[in-house]
Image (cartoon, grey):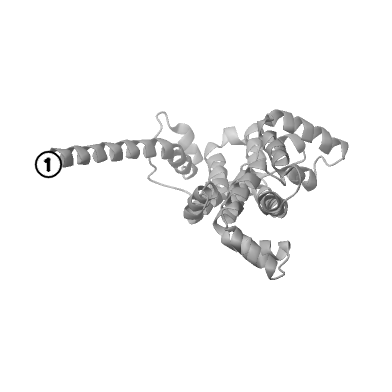
Amino acid sequence: MSERKGSALSKTLICICLVIWALIVLFPFYWMVLTSFKDTARYMDEMVPTFFTAEPTLANYGKAFTEVPLGKYFLNTVIFTVATTGLMMLVIVPAAFAFARLEFRGKNLVFALFLSLMMIPTELVIITNFVTIVEWNMRNTFLGLILPSVTSVFYIYLLKENFEAIPDDLYNAARVDGTSDLKYLLKVMVPISQPTIVTIIILKVIECWNSYVWPRLITDDPNYFLVSNGIQSIRESGYGREDIPAMMAAVVVVSVPLIILFLAFRDKIMAGVSRGGTKG
C-alpha cells in the first residue's frame, strides 16, 4: 500500500514539475500573442504590464502587412525553403543509398572522412561559403542563398542508418530480378524509409524558415530578405521599437506556420528520429 502511495506521489510531483516547466516555456509565446492584440496607445500607457487585455484588436496584424513588405518576405522564404529542401533531398537520398548499399573501395574511410566534416566549426564554413559566393557573383541572389544549404552530413548519416536497417534479402532478391539500383531505391527503400524522410523534410523546412545568419550575411537587398531578416530589419528601422504590438503581430504571423507544421507532424518527427538510430 505504501509503495502505491509513494508511486502516486512521485507521479504527482513529476506532473507538477512538468506543468511548471511548460508554463515557463510557453509564457514568452503567450506574451508575444497577447501583446499583438493590444492597442498601441494603451500598450504605451501601461505603467505595469498586464497579463490580459479586455479589448483585443486585430489592427496590429493589418499594420504588419501594410507598413512593411511582410508578404514579400514570406514569398522569399517559401521559395528559399522549397528550393533548398527539394535540392537537398536530391543530394542526400542517393548519397545515403551509396554509403548504405553500394560496395566500393575505401567506402568506410570515405564515410569516416565525410563524418569528420561535422567537426569543422560552423563559422569557418560560413566564411568559406561567403568568399565562394562572392567570387561567383551570387550575392543578393536566390542561388547564393540556396546553394550552401543543399546538403547535410547529419541527414545523410541519419538516412544511411535507416537504409541499412532494411534487410539485405530485399536488395539481393531485387538484383536477381534484374532491378536496377535506382529503381530499387525509389520503389523499395524510399517507401520503407518514409517516416525518416518525412522527418528530414520537416526538420529542413524548420531550419530554412528560421535561417538568419547566412541570409543576413549574403543579402543586403530587401528584395531578397527572408522573414527572419525582415523582422530584424523592421526592428532596426525604428518602426519595431515605436510600435511594439505591430512588431509582435509580425512575429506571430512568422511563427504560426512552423508551430502548425510541428504539431501536425510531431508523431512522424519522433518516429523518424528514433527509427533512424535503430537497426534490425
Q: Is residue 91 visible?
A: yes
Is 257 positioned to the left or the right of 93 in the image?
left
Residue at image point 49% right, 48% down: 274
Q: Is residue 223 visible?
A: no
- How many numbered marks, from 0 up? 1
Residue at image point 41% right, 47% down: 55
Q: Residue 258 versus residue 128: which sits nearer the camera?
A: 128
Please determine whether, in this image, residue 272 is positioned above or below residue 46. Answer: below
The residue beneath circle 1 is 1
**Mark 1 Cα-neighbour bin, 10 Å: few <14, some 14–19, many ≥20:** few
Residue 184: % across, % down: 67, 64
Residue at image point 67% right, 61% down: 185
Q: Amino acid at mark 1?
A: Met
Residue 39: % across, % down: 48, 42
Q: Residue 228 versus residue 131: which sits nearer the camera?
A: 131
Please determine whether, in this image, residue 109 is positioned above or below residue 57. Answer: above
Residue 74: % across, % down: 65, 50
- Describe the element under mark 1 as helix, strand or loop: loop
Residue at image point 87% right, 36% down: 135
Quadrant containing the N terminus is top left
Is 62 positioned to the left or the right of 271 in the image?
right
Q: Residue furthest bottom?
A: 177
Residue 264: % across, % down: 49, 56
Is 131 positioned to the left or the right of 85 in the image?
right
Q: Residue 227 versus residue 213: which sits nearer the camera?
A: 213
Q: Residue 90 versus residue 225: which sits nearer the camera?
A: 90
